[in-house]
Image (cartoon, rainbow, N blue to C red):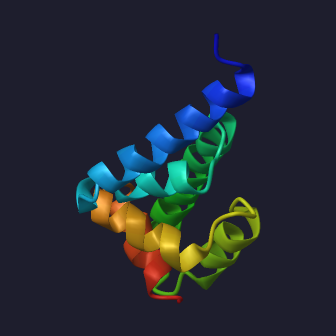
Amino acid sequence: METIDQKLEKFEFYQSLFLKMIESDQNAFYKMVIEKQLAKQDVEQFYNLCEQLTRELKEMKEEKFVYFYPLFQQFKVRLHEKLEPAEVIAACLQQGLYPELMEALKRNL
């Protein structure tokens, strides 16, 4: 019978193989989540952050703002410590997550 450590080691090995299988750009953000070993709550917090920033972006655009550096600052400060802004923005754009927000944030890199 396998021990918990042996099962965990096998799972980690399978996970690494799985990541190699999904080299597609259409899952770039999900792949990054797995590679960085983020928890479900970390991803949910990220989605909540993006939803909030998307609302703020819409309000700023309605007020005729053209520079969105304050949004980028919020994004950078509130982003999970394991994630880099440029990497997250690129992955989200590749996967099509929050495209309008990510394009605005990308301009501040």
Tell me if residue 61 can be seen.
no
Q: Tell whether 15 sits left or right of 53.
A: left
Residue found at the far top of this picture: 1
Question: Where residue 3 sits in the image (x, y, percent)?
Answer: 72, 19
Name which residue lies at 34% across and 63% down. 99
Report the number of discs. Answer: 0
Q: Is residue 74 above or below residue 13?
A: below
From the viewer's side, name the closer residue of 106 and 29: 29
Quadrant position of residue 45 = top right
Dividing the image into 4 quarters, which one contains the N terminus?
top right
Residue reaching furthest front?
1
Left or right of residue 60, residue 31 in this image? left
Q: In which quarter of the image is residue 71?
A: bottom right
> Residue 94 location in percent, x, y?
29, 65
Up the image or down, 9 lies above or below 65; here it is above
**Is residue 54 among what the camera can see?**
yes
Q: Residue at x 53, y 88 (%)?
A: 108
Q: Which of 101 and 14 is in front in this view?
A: 14
Judge from the rendering whether residue 67 lies leftward or rightward of residue 81; answer left or right: left
Q: Which of 23 and 57 is in front in this view?
A: 23
Tell me what residue is drawn at x 62 percent, y 73 percent. 84
Quadrant in which residue 80 is drawn: bottom right
Residue drawn at point x = 64 percent, y = 66 percent: 83
Residue 65, horizontal then vertical, whole percent:
49, 81
